[in-house]
Image (cartoon, rainbow, N blue to C red):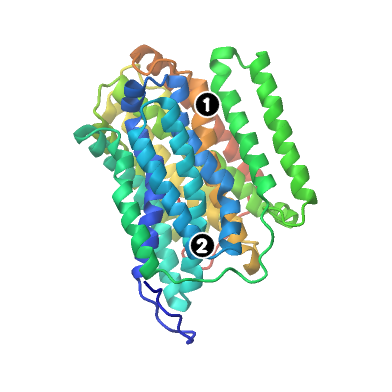
């Protein structure tokens, strides 16, 4: 099997088959964030995972994906990109099979961790192939299609998760990846270009990546156990101190190493760092909303997994509609106004859900809050993306985009961990406990959104792009 030959012409057209293959693989990665949320109650009941630990099925995947994403990008630069893509795809596919066959919560969480590592290799390698293989107008079209994958994955994930769980079983939300992954790996050898390793690539910062991932895992573990052991308990405080020590060691190591994951100069770009902080927080609220409502709709309202997935569809569509609107009006109103307004709207939606009665009606009590959160976050995403990239030099664009993607994934992990801990749902089957935790969780989400709105007003620069702005992929 041979890869398509490179053409020497600068404007040579490349076949779109490579983009389609890479997009399918990336679609699986994005899908596996939201597709799992709808199946959580069924997973918890079948494998005996308590409510306090159930969030790890979501958290460990996005935590390792986000924590290792920059290292994965560096590996794709140092080694042959197609080989790194195939390694990531193979690990992701094998871990999907292990997830579907898992007989215990521990096995499932371990398999999900392996999925996250595979995704951290697959995603940056795939994107680097897209950006280097296509040129000119083709590259612009390819990146536009790539950006659309995230929104489509979120919308399809909630419905597909409900369909598979209701009509087959929760195992199939993972097993469906296996034939797709195997087929994509076989086709990759024929379709993808065999690109050599990047010239002049720097050393890999493996110790730095291990420090930051270990610190984040310990932090989430401390938050996860706080409702049971107490926020001021010796266990929580000791784990929190250990997590901070590991993250501080990461910062010191990064300052001294010759090949840091993130060069120190990038941390001084205020627009990027403020944008990444807001993106981290708002993603946490959004993914936490999926998590809490999956438990509530099925555990309290008695909805099926499919009904729950369809219930999330208006939220996913609202994000896309609001993002399109924000991109169109940003040149006139500026990014800061959109970000702040979106966060206030998100806070209003979260507090509206917190005020819902214990047995809330979907149409009258839950849907308005979901729509407000969807429209709010849809305004924030393009505003934050444009602002964060506004003062980035062309040679820093890939690194900055990687930093934003990392903030997005880590936000999903920390958001679920924090809101699950505040909700303190100890028994997935207990309707009263879920309802009480639901209220507490969304009060916290509303408070976080208001704090982020204040940060946006104070620290996020206002940018008015000359043309319609594009939201980043999620």
Number of residues whose C-alpha sits closer than 10 Å to that of mark 2, classed few (under 14), some (14–19) or many (20 or more): some
Q: Kindly tell me whether residue 467 is visible in this rendering.
A: no
Q: Is residue 324 left or right of residue 298?
A: right
> Is 203 placed left or right of 150 in the picture?
right
In the rendering, which numbered label is found on residue 444?
1
Farthest residue to the left: give it: 167
Give the residue pinned by disc 2: 331
- The quarter of the picture where the N terminus appears is bottom left
Residue 363, given in percent of the width and then of the height, sits at 26, 30
Name the element at disc 2.
helix
Determine the residue located farthest toward the front in the rendered image.
Answer: 1
Q: Residue furthest bottom?
A: 9
Front residue (pair 317, 116): 116
- For disc 1, the neighbor class at 10 Å (few under 14, some 14 to 19, many from 20) is many
Task: Name which residue lies at 44% across and 37% down.
Answer: 111
Determine the image quadrant of residue 263. Answer: bottom right
Residue 231 in the image: x percent, y percent?
62, 17
């Amino acid at each position: 099997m041979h890869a398509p030959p490179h053409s020497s012409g600068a404007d040579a057209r490349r076949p779109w088959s490579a983009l389609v293959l890479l997009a399918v693989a990336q679609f699986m990665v994005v899908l596996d964030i939201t597709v799992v949320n709808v199946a959580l109650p069924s997973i918890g009941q079948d494998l005996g995972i308590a409510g306090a630990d159930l969030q790890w099925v979501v958290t460990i995947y996005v935590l390792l994906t986000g924590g290792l994403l920059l290292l994965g990008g560096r590996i794709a630069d140092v080694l042959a990109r197609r080989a790194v893509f195939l390694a990531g795809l193979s690990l992701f596919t094998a871990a999907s099979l292990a997830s579907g066959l898992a007989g215990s919560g521990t096995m499932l969480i371990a398999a999900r961790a392996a999925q996250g590592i595979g995704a951290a290799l697959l995603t940056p390698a795939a994107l680097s192939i897209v950006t280097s293989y296509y040129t000119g107008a083709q590259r612009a079209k390819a990146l536009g299609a790539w950006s659309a994958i995230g929104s489509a994955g979120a919308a399809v994930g909630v419905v597909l998760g409900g369909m598979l769980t209701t009509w087959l079983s929760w195992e199939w939300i993972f097993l469906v990846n296996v034939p797709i992954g195997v087929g994509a790996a076989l086709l990759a050898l024929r379709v993808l270009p065999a690109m050599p390793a990047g010239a002049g690539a720097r050393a890999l910062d493996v110790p730095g990546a291990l420090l930051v991932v270990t610190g984040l895992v310990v932090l989430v573990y401390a938050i996860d156990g706080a409702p049971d052991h107490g926020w001021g308990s010796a266990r929580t405080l000791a784990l929190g101190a250990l997590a901070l020590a590991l993250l501080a060691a990461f910062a010191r190591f990064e300052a001294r190493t010759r090949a840091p994951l993130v060069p120190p100069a990038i941390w001084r770009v205020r627009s990027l760092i403020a944008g990444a902080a807001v993106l981290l927080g708002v993603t946490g609220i959004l993914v936490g909303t999926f998590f809490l409502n999956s438990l509530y709709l099925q555990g309290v309202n008695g909805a099926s997994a499919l009904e729950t997935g369809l219930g999330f569809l208006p939220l996913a569509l609202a994000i896309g509609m609001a993002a399109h609107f924000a991109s169109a009006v940003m040149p006139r109103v500026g990014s800061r106004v959109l970000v702040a307004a979106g966060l206030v709207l998100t806070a209003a939606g979260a507090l509206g859900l917190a005020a819902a009665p214990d047995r809330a009606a979907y149409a009258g009590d839950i849907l308005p809050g979901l729509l407000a959160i969807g429209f709010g976050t849809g305004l924030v995403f393009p505003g934050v993306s444009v602002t964060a990239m506004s003062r980035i030099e062309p040679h820093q664009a890939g690194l900055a985009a990687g930093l934003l993607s990392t903030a997005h994934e880590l936000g999903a992990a920390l958001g679920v961990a924090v809101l699950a801990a505040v909700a303190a749902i100890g028994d997935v089957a207990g309707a009263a406990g879920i309802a009480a935790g639901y209220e507490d969780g969304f009060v916290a989400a509303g408070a976080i959104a208001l704090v982020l709105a204040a940060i946006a007003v104070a620290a996020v620069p206002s940018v008015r792009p000359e043309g319609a702005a594009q939201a980043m992929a999620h």
